[in-house]
Image (spheres, rainbow, N blue to C red):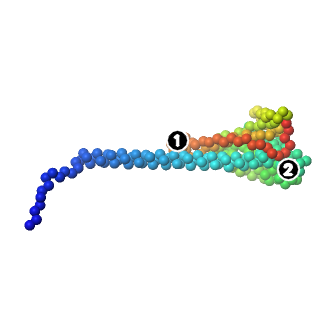
Amino acid sequence: MKRFQALTNCKGLTLIELMIVLVLSLLLMGTVYMTFQLQHNSGQAQTQVAATQQDIRAAMDVIAMDIMHAGLSRDPSGNIQGIPTGTSGTSTLQLQMDYTNDGVTTGTDELVTYRLNNGNLERIDVNAGVTQILARNVTLLSFQYLGRTKTNTTQQIDPGAGTLSQAQARAVRFIEVTVTKEGDKVDPQTGNAIERTLSRWVCRRNGTIDEI
């Protein structure tokens, strides 16, 4: 016959101990969730920063290419003025070049204007009547101009509140382009829009450029 021995000293977990374990488990789960959320938000912010910077660089590359081509003519006697008189200032830039080598700048992409219009950085092909949006959510587009003096030093060319005069436009050798753009979404960590600025000096390579 089997005998059963009573266990008189076998204790389990009390209700208080179970509650303590539950609270500690909740704290641990909360810490893990907060860590995940912070990493997720940081990853989203970095993605927005990278996308914003890439958009600015892409737009800047297009502008820089047109600046370097301004005044281009396969015929050296063509004397194409890279920056037309009275068209460019601190917020607008117009450039012309003769890609077709016909002595005039009436072809497609031979007269282009850059401007900021309602948050859009626009490249306008004047002759074709086509407007291309290079970047959206742009808050600043500015241009600064430098020329070279007869003593081989650089000097700022200031159009003031207006546009470059003929003498000023013909003397521009370097153009600084500055673009500030906001991201498409807000930073989840700060609640503010992600904003990045890129500035680049571009040297003109074509056409007759006068000394100051």
Residue 101 x, y percent position in the rendering = 86, 53
Q: Is residue 93 visible?
A: no
Label number found at residue 73: 2
Viewer-side label of 1, 2: 2
Q: Nearer the viewer, residue 184 or 147?
A: 147
Residue 84 x, y percent position in the rendering = 82, 42
Q: Is residue 111 left or right of residue 23?
A: right
Of all residues, the one furthest to the bottom in this rendering is 1
Quarter occupied by the N terminus = bottom left
Residue 176 x, y percent position in the rendering = 73, 40
Label 1 neighbourhood size at 10 Å, few (<14), some (14-19), many (20+)? few
What residue lies at 77% left-to-right and 33% top-to-bottom? 156
Label number found at residue 82: none
What residue lies at 75% left-to-right and 43% top-to-bottom? 202
Label 2 neighbourhood size at 10 Å, few (<14), some (14-19), many (20+)? many
Q: Mark 2 falls on what kind of element?
A: loop
Q: Is residue 135 left or right of residue 76?
A: left
Q: Mark 1 falls on what kind of element?
A: loop
Q: Nearer the viewer, residue 194 or 18?
A: 18
Residue 71 x, y percent position in the rendering = 83, 46
Q: How many marks?
A: 2
Quarter occupied by the C terminus = top right
Disc 1 marks which residue?
191
Badge 2 amino acid? Ser
Disc on the earlier residue, 1 or 2: 2
Quadrant location of residue 167?
top right
Quadrant location of residue 182?
top right
What residue lies at 29% left-to-right and 47% top-to-bottom? 21
Q: Is residue 121 left or right of residue 157?
A: left
